[in-house]
Amino acid sequence: MTDFNVDNKLSEYMHELGRLARKSYSVLRVTNNNTKNYALKKMAEEIRKREKQILAANEIDISRAIDKSISDSFLDRLRLNSDRINIIANSLENIALLPDPIGTVDESWTQPNGLKFSKVRVPIGVIGMIYESRPNVTADAGALCLKSGNACILRGGSEGQNSNKAIHMALITGLEEAGLPKETIQLVNTTDRAAVGLLLGGINETVDLIIPRGGKNLIERVQNDARVPVLAHLEGICHSYIHSQADLNKAEAIILNAKLRRTGVCGATETMLVDKSIANKALKRIGKQLLRNNCKILGDKASQKILPNITIAKENDYFTEHLAPILNIKIVKNIDEAIQHINHYGSGHTDAIITENKNCAAYFLKSIDSAICMHNTSTQFADGGEFGFGAEIGIATGRLHARGPVGAKQLTTYKYQVTGNGQIRD
């Protein structure tokens, strides 16, 4: 694996990463599932063995982030501990347990002339991953790319540089023990922002897909500058709507979890909508619990009449991903106004309805134009692991190729295989 140092030109270094990734992909695309799974299991073992080294590296990153007065939500995403290390290792093992997406036949048919057609899953190729703050993405992205037969080039943010390197070393060991090229998963070894530009340019046509994961500014830059396809993860402006026929016991538990379990994740609810007919009872109960848990509430005038101590929300608040213990509230006339609000202010990420009326739930799920639509559960289940994908490389909020949690299968494309018996075309 190529190392970057002052004697290297950045462009030469990045082009070498691209060349090695392409070479590794030619091996990986035909590697059997047992070998890939063995590598994943060895990676998990190494993550656990290297826990002290990884945590020590993370402490350096945390210390530097604190010195820069980084926000609490950012620190939460950056911070590792023993439990989170174990979750990273578990995710690697869970990915190994998944069926191999490569070679899966999506559909097959036979034409009247006897030709047999099959639509078969294949890898995408070389994936460039650009991400901020979350060290676990290093492991998740590398593992999911491996499982799906893709080589990858990872460019983590400078704030997690030491943590990413420590985790990456464990991944490399797993690859080597399985006899796979160590360049299958490469980590860009420089914080020079020009490296991102080269990656977005496709590094001399060696990169097939870019996946960004981070804040709005990062996503906008990637989408504006990329010269290869982008699978984007946009903001998580998620909603939870309490319908007039909601069970308030469920609603209270769901809202507190959806907002406060981890406020810095993209699946955290940012706006709670409440039907007018149930608002007085619901807000007095749920609003007080939110305030007791130190959640700041920004509400419309109607909700302030019920909860006098809350702050009046501004128009822009409903377009904001707070990533903090801050919740917008709005009282709506009915389900149609709730749907209209979500489709206008939402980011197409995850939105939920809380109701005991199945017909209304079905109407909501059909009408909401988001990647993930939920009924009677917390928006914080917007996570690849919770979907049974082992892990995720991000939540895709666009409409092409993949939507929602992007796991191993979503990192594949397809080709057609046609089998004949001597047929020729007239």
Image (cartoon, helix red, strand yellow):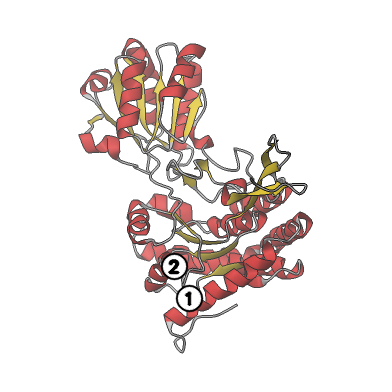
Q: Are marks 1 and 2 in contact (CB under 8 Å)?
A: yes
| Quarter holding residue 306 | top left
Left or right for 179, reference 234: right
* Location of residue 153 with respect to 230 vertically, above or below: below
Q: Residue at x 57, y 51 (%)?
A: 411
At horizontal 47% and vertical 41% (from top left) the residue drawn is 262
Residue 135 image position (x, y, % from top left): 52, 59
Where residue 71 appears, as percent x and y from the top left, is 36, 53
* Relative to 5, 336 lies left or right: left
Can you say whether 135 is above or below 110 in the image?
below
Q: Which amino acid type is marked by label 1?
A: Met
The percent coordinates of residue 322 (x first, y second) are: 34, 42
Question: Dot 1 corresponds to which residue?
Answer: 14
Q: Which residue is mark 2?
A: 199
Residue at image point 59% right, 74% down: 20
Residue 85 or 44: which is nearer the viewer?
44
Q: CA distance from mark 1 to mark 2?
A: 8 Å
Three-letter amino acid code of the residue under disc 2 = Leu
Element assignment for label 1: helix
| Element at label 2 | helix
- Above or below: residue 316 compared with residue 218: above
The mark that comes first in sequence, 1 or 2, is 1
Residue 224's disc is none
